[in-house]
Image (cartoon, helix red, strand yellow):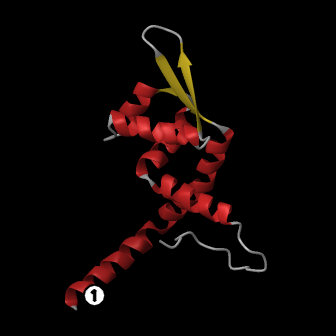
Amino acid sequence: MPSTAPVPRDRSHEMDPRVEALVTEVIGRVADKWTMLILELLAEQGEMRFTRIGKAVPGISQKMLTQTLRQMERDGLVVRTVHAVIPPRVDYRLTDLGETLGEAFCGVWLWAAANLERIEAARCAFDARAGAG
């Protein structure tokens, strides 16, 4: 399946295929709603317990929370800290890498907020044309 990641227009130098693969993978992962919600939550709240994250992310199952946090940890976006207490306590916090990714995607949120009405109007116009045709 061909890559759907945007390719720089300046082709004076070839794109490193590892960079292209990473961009495609990271965009796919961050576009996943759970990753985005957890990224945003940890950016706002700082370090949080596993159970508190689960309660703060509406609709996420414990299995999906575990999988998402594990993948984020693997990618270097969060740090997992296990405290040797009874009952066990596990905290998560963003790494510098996770914070910079959150900042990069903050622009998308700002763009969406600034263009919400335009997108809704375009969708309504499209739906009206599609329904009429």
Q: Position of residue 8 (x, y in %)?
A: 67, 74
Could you classify mark 1 by the number of other residues whose Cα lies within 10 Å: few (under 14), some (14-19), or many (20 or more)?
A: few
Task: Identify the image quadrant of residue 108.
Answer: bottom right
Who's the residue at 57% across and 32% down the image? 93
Who's the residue at 42% across and 51% down the image? 33
Residue type (three-letter) at the residue carrying disc 1:
Arg
Secondary structure state at the residue bearing disc 1: helix
Q: To which residue does mark 1 refer?
A: 129
Who's the residue at 67% across and 61% down the image? 19
- The residue lying toward the viewer, choosing from 97 and 14, is 14
- The residue lying toward the viewer, choosing from 87 and 126, is 87
Task: Identify the image quadrant of residue 9.
Answer: bottom right
Q: Residue furthest left?
A: 132
Q: Position of residue 31 (x, y in %)?
A: 47, 56
Above or below, comparing residue 109 to residue 61 in the picture? below
Above or below, comparing residue 15 to residue 71 in the picture? below
Q: Position of residue 126 (x, y in %)?
A: 32, 82
**Callout count:** 1
Q: Residue furthest right?
A: 12
Question: Along the horizontal axis of the image, is 101 left or right of 121?
Answer: right
Question: Along the horizontal axis of the image, is 111 left or right of 119?
Answer: right
Task: Identify the image quadrant of residue 96.
Answer: top right
Q: Quadrant of the C terminus?
A: bottom left
Q: Residue furthest top?
A: 86
Who's the residue at 61% across and 43% down the image? 98
Q: Position of residue 34 (x, y in %)?
A: 42, 46
- The residue lying toward the viewer, choosing from 13 and 121, is 13
